[in-house]
Image (cartoon, rainbow, N blue to C red):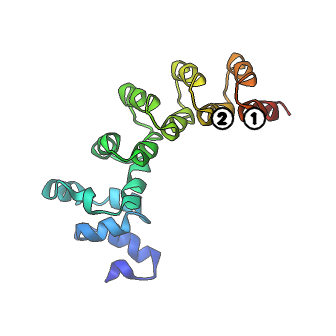
Amino acid sequence: MLSEQLSPDIRAAVAGHPNTPAAVLGRLAADYPAEVLGNPALSLLRLAHPGLLEGWPTDAVLNLVAQPQAPDWLRRYALAHADARFQVAVAGHPDLDAAELGQLARHTVWKVRARVAARPDLSPEWLTALLADPDYGVRLVLAARADLPPDDAERLGQDVSLLVRQAMRQRKT
């Protein structure tokens, strides 16, 4: 009953309360992902219900995955998920290791690679690799980077995609 109150403060408190049932947490996770992740009972609920996230709304789980404080187990869940939206959500996670980042940078879905291209901590090696990405959307994200090295900017200025070339011209103005 408290989880359906109009007050966001009350709903947030319910999301963080250790006695909140798993199904209610799943409903609240869409609007209160930080509180759900901070719920002290979440680890126990996960142990008690191995398929815990499978019963929760997809948007709620995606919001959890996208949180910087998302734990390792949730990141692994997203990396292995069949739905590419989970990889898009996890690609911005600050604690990805090199293998996970490599998996995402080579993903078959361009939106995942574009999310990797937007990472502020993108290594020069991955930046170079993504400059040759077959999808112009990924290269367009690279063109928007403020930290793009001059040689890479020159390369994108001569890109086969008109949109990427236009983006590079706009940078110069």
> Quick one: SS at disc 1?
helix
Q: Which of 35 and 78 is in front in this view?
A: 78
Q: Nearer the viewer, residue 102 or 28?
A: 102
Q: Hey, what amino acid is under mark 2?
A: Leu
Which picture quadrant has residue 149? Answer: top right
Instruction: Find disc 2 in the rendering and name its residue.
Output: 140
Say which quadrant the N terminus sits in: bottom left
Give me the C-alpha separation between circle 2 and circle 1: 7 Å
Q: In the image as oriented, which residue stretches furthest toward the right? A: 173
Crowding at dot 2, Cα within 10 Å, few <14 / some 14-19 / many 20+, comes out as many
- Across and down, in percent, residue 146 comes to 69, 32
- Across and down, in percent, residue 73 comes to 27, 44
Q: In the image as oriented, which residue stretches furthest toward the left? A: 48
- Across and down, in percent, residue 139 comes to 63, 30
Q: Hey, what amino acid is under mark 1?
A: Ala
Which picture quadrant has residue 5? Answer: bottom left
Residue 69, placed above or below residue 55:
above
> Quick one: SS at disc 2?
helix
